[in-house]
Amino acid sequence: MNDLLDVILGAFLNVVIEVQQYTFHVIRSFANLFRGPRYLGDTLVQMDVIGVGSLLIICLTGFFTGAVLAMQSAKSLESFGAVGLTGQLVAVSLVRELGPVLSALMVAGRNASGMASEIGSMVVSDQILAMRALGTDPSKKLSTPRLVATVTMLPVLTAIADFIGIFGGYIVSRFLLHISSALYWSTVYHNLSYNDLLEGLLKPFIFGAIIATVGCHCGFRTYGGTQGVGRSTTQAVVAASILIITVDAVITRIVLVFLR
Amino acid sequence: MSLQSYPPMPASEPGLRPAKESTVAPAIEVRKLSISFEEHAVLDNVSFRVREGETKVILGESASGKTVLIKLISGLIKPDSGKVFIFGKEITPLSEDELMSIRKDIGVVFQESALFDSLSVLENVAYRLHEEGGHSETEIEERVSEVLGFVGLEQTMNLMPSDLSGGMKRRVSIARALITHPKIILYDEPTAGLDPLTGRTIVELILRLRDLEGVSSVLVTHRLTDAFTVASERFQDPNGEASRPRLKGRSQQRAELLTSFVVLKNGGVFFDGSEEELLAAQKQQPFIREFLS
């Protein structure tokens, strides 16, 4: 019985320590924005890796999500004789919810894992120690550029995913459901409010911060050689994905209470 | 290997400048240093000094805390108790930001080289200069070329670390540590895993830095041949492939001022003294006799 209690207490303590270390990492990464040196070149490289590099998967995800959403919603709307509102449903669902969340999950899968494995490999091969020995703060050099790049690129990628998704919905609506182009685009245009756009573009900023901080934090706490790098990579994707979905629920509730 | 534009050597006779005595603060002072990992004491009450221009050879069995000592001296980890002084300044209470400026005077050569594998040799060696800023690309390339020439690898500038052999990686690592002319270099097993010839090249670089540049250093090794080569030879002919003979008589005594030994046992300092004292101690101390045999 005592052994079980010890195990539970030990696990709880580990979670508390992990949360504490992650919080310190987040604070340090943001605080670095106000302290030199600033690594503009590294930030631009990361913007290219995260932004341009994720463009294809974001476009594909957006397009097929929009297309499937149009097919599924048309089937439900048909029973109310409201197939013409497909554009509205696709647009609002994508902009408020699916665009931000799916883009974030895609970028988390691609980049949080990349950050964790890259930094993790540097940790296990003493490159992080060497960096510190050479007078560089790894947090400033590695974390903050990735944070800035993800926070700036994810909203852009989300906006692109939203547009491509609505376009995917249009292709399905026009050629499978035979809804006129004018009807589709007018329902899209007239039913998207500024609050929808605000919610849809607020989320990616927060999701971007989650992806970068979780990815880098998991990388920095890597131990145990190449196996440890693999473990950190998996943990980064899982933790970032769960945090994104959890925070999405919280933001959605806040927005529904305060902006509706 | 030319050193023409490398920082000027002190005017005195190269290779025979005795380490400066206690009128100035020692380059490194470790005072009652202790550290434990998961309740296992790795270092316990370790104290020693490294005078300016001196090479301190740290010997000890595997897992005796030699690498931990290097990390403590460079401020990469904090001790549980005790103090580390670099040129008289205590570094143990300093924050990471404050340590950054101290580390500019310290070069570290890691056991596995720790080169940045996504950067070329040029970018690796120039890393500190890029971080400092204010250097033109031409100036950086010149300095990298010069320091790579010093370690005999000027032709590797555009290669990636994965293209280099183990010995070449160590030499690039030394070049990277040298680029800003640090006053202290910490070598962590620089010859481990290398063949004797390549190991000899690295040892000659260590001699060269000690004897020509007056760099203070800590050399962690468990290769006794390397340790005694550093203690008993000096870099003699900067222009050629001349031999580095074992020194005798007065020269030997003077060379001993440049190198001393610390032997670690069970986390503590078991021996601290010159080569001659170490060889004498083995007669009385079974551990040293066993260790040196």
Image: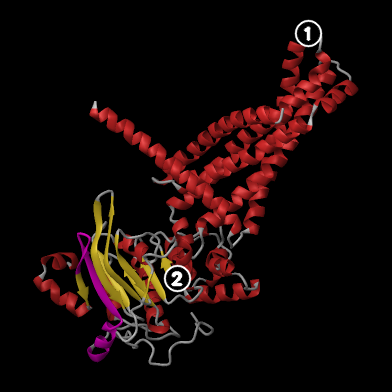
Q: Is residue B256 magenta?
A: yes
Q: CB of mark 1 within 8 Å of CB of mark 2?
A: no
- In this view, the residue farthest toward the top is A79
- Secondary structure of residue under mark 2: helix
In the rendered structure, which amino acid carries the disc numbered 2? Ile
For the point 84% across and 19% down, the residue is A175
Q: Is residue A221 left or right of residue A32?
A: left
The quadrant where residue B241 appears: bottom left
- Secondary structure of residue under mark 1: loop
Which residue, given by chain and number where applicable, does mark 2 sit on?
B102
Q: Which residues are magenta?
A: B249-270
Q: Is residue B227 magenta?
A: no
**Above-or-below relation of B53 to A223:** below
The quadrant where residue B73 appears: bottom left
**Above-or-below relation of A65 to B221:** above
Quadrant holding the C terminus of chain B: bottom left
> Can residue B191 be seen in this snapshot?
no
Q: Is residue B3 left or right of residue A179?
A: left
In the rendered structure, which amino acid carries the disc numbered 1? Phe
Query: Which label was assigned to residue B35?
Result: none
For the point 59% across and 37% down, the residue is A108
As measured in the structure, the alpha-carbon distance from the residue carrying label 1 to the one carrying label 2 is: 74 Å
- In this view, the residue farthest toward the front is A258
Which residue, given by chain and number where applicable, does mark 1 sit on?
A80
**Above-or-below relation of B24 to B284:** below
Percent x, y of residue A240: 54, 36
